[in-house]
């Protein structure tokens, strides 16, 4: 119970959804790895990684700013937040789709091994995750974490259901798994919106407001856009940090290393199990800190953040130790002998994941303090470290792992400094 007391409200509800989603995700990856084999699985695994680069990377700001504004009670009503956010999100989705279509020949040949269906699945991911992040932002801001958790349940279980349905009507296994990745977010949105008319807490349960006239809508877009710009830079940088390593392995792999990206990705997935479930904390942390910051409760803000950082650091140490002892064995048992990696690989990947959890906590604190620009600069500083370390060369996995670790450590320091300088925080 003392551990649960350190967590923001809603963490348990979202965590329950993530448990189901995590089990479903690892079941999906295991099935895909064993059914397709290392070489055929690699483009599907890259679709998985690229979907999280292009989806949450670009749409996470939509969720963050929507949740912050609603939780901070700075909006005149729910519609005044959702409508401009939906316009911005839809415009962004359209722009990304256009860019993807232009780059389609290169993506299909270089990343998807000539499988056109995987590009179609990528377009589905863009639309589905865009809608999903908007819905999750509204639910988080309103404190409806049950619906937020249902999103992850629908996404995870839905992916497996789509595999089952696809295997009955399609003969191409790559298409089955690719379309399951693309369609799952839509089922997550449907599950999240189930029962959404239940009573909300506090002032959000107000009567419907009248339609907002067009000039007011333009003003709301103008108010959201600057923060969204900084958050977009930060979110894309975050997504690059999360997903650049397997893509880098694929691009740097030699002619005899075509299955290395799939091996690396599966090792990374195991090492990031704690980070996956950390999403539950992240989802509820921003509304909590935003509410405290808006009300001027800086001492409680500092207390909540400090306790969470201590807990995250302790969990990170445990995760690194677990990967040192059995991480490589788990990878081989789950995915097969052809996906085996070394103990050193698991330790370095787990260490980068542990530091990344701290970075994400600090990022939420900076967003709540309306320091989106400084947070974006910190992520960019971290990204600059990646190619510098990568350039030293050496073993393919080792150079990518060290570059990833240097990236998150740099970002952590760059975020801690501005927080430490703000009165009442971190000291």
Image (cartoon, rainbow, N blue to C red):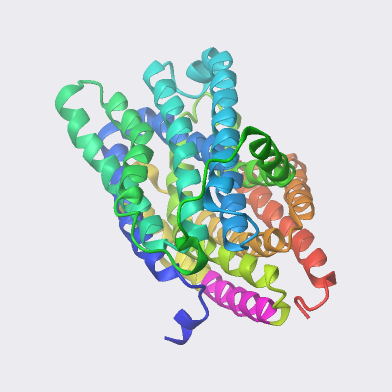
Residue 215 seen from this side = yes
Quarter of the image where the C terminus is located: bottom right
Return the residue nearer the eye: 240 or 342.
Answer: 240
Residue 313: in magenta span: yes
Expressed as whole percent of the image width and height from the top left, the position of residue 380 reads: 76, 46
The quadrant in which residue 415 appears is bottom right
What segment is highlighted magenta in the picture? 300-317
Q: In which quarter of the image is the N terminus?
A: bottom left
Q: Position of residue 204 (x, y in %)?
A: 49, 61
The residue nearer to you, when weighing 340 against 251, is 251
Front position in the image: 88 or 127: 88
On screen, residue 143 versus residue 238, left or right, reads left
Q: Name the chief secondary structure element in magenta.
A: helix
- Residue at left 72%, top 47%? 227
Does residue 100 sit above or below 369 in this rendering?
above
> Residue 259, relative to residue 308: is it above or below?
above
Q: Is residue 378 left or right of residue 94?
A: right
* Percent x, y of residue 343: 49, 58
Q: Is residue 101 above or below residue 364?
A: above
> Within the magenta stretch, is there residue 213?
no
């Amino acid at each position: 119970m003392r551990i649960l007391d350190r967590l923001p409200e809603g963490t348990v509800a979202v965590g329950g959804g993530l448990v189901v989603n995590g089990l479903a995700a690892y079941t999906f990856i295991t099935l895909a790895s064993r059914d397709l084999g290392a070489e055929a699985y690699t483009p599907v695994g890259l679709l998985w990684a690229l979907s999280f680069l292009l989806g949450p990377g670009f749409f996470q700001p939509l969720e963050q700013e929507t949740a912050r504004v609603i939780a901070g009670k700075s909006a005149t009503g729910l519609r005044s937040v959702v409508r401009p956010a939906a316009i911005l999100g839809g415009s962004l989705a359209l722009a990304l789709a256009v860019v993807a279509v232009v780059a389609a020949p290169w993506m299909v040949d270089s990343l998807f091994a000539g499988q056109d269906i995987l590009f179609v699945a990528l377009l589905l991911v863009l639309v589905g995750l865009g809608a999903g992040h908007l819905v999750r932002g509204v639910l988080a801001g309103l404190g409806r974490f049950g619906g937020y958790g249902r999103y992850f349940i629908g996404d995870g279980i839905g992916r497996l259901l789509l595999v089952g349905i696809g295997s009955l009507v399609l003969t191409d296994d790559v298409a089955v798994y690719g379309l399951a990745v693309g369609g799952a977010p839509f089922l997550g949105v449907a599950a999240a919106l189930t029962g959404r008319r239940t009573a909300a807490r506090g002032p959000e349960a107000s009567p419907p407001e009248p339609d907002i006239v067009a000039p007011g809508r333009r003003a709301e877009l103008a108010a959201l856009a600057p923060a969204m710009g900084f958050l977009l830079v930060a979110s894309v940088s975050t997504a690059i940090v999360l997903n650049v390593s397997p893509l880098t392995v694929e691009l740097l792999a030699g002619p005899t290393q075509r299955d290395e990206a799939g091996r690396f990705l599966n090792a990374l997935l195991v090492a990031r199990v704690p980070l996956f479930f950390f999403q539950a904390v992240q989802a509820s942390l921003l509304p909590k800190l935003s509410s405290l910051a808006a009300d001027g409760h800086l001492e409680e803000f500092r207390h909540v953040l400090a306790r969470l950082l201590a807990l995250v650091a302790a969990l990170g140490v445990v995760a690194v130790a677990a990967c040192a002892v059995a991480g490589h064995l788990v990878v081989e048992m789950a995915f097969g002998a052809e996906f085996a990696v070394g103990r050193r690989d698991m330790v370095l990947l787990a260490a980068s994941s542990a530091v990344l959890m701290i970075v994400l906590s600090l990022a939420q604190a900076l967003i709540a303090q309306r320091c989106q620009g400084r947070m974006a600069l910190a992520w960019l500083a971290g990204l600059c470290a990646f190619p510098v370390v990568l350039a030293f060369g050496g073993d393919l996995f080792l150079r990518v792992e060290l570059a990833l670790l240097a990236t998150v450590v740099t970002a952590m320091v760059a975020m801690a400094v501005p927080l430490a300088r703000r009165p009442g925080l971190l000291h």
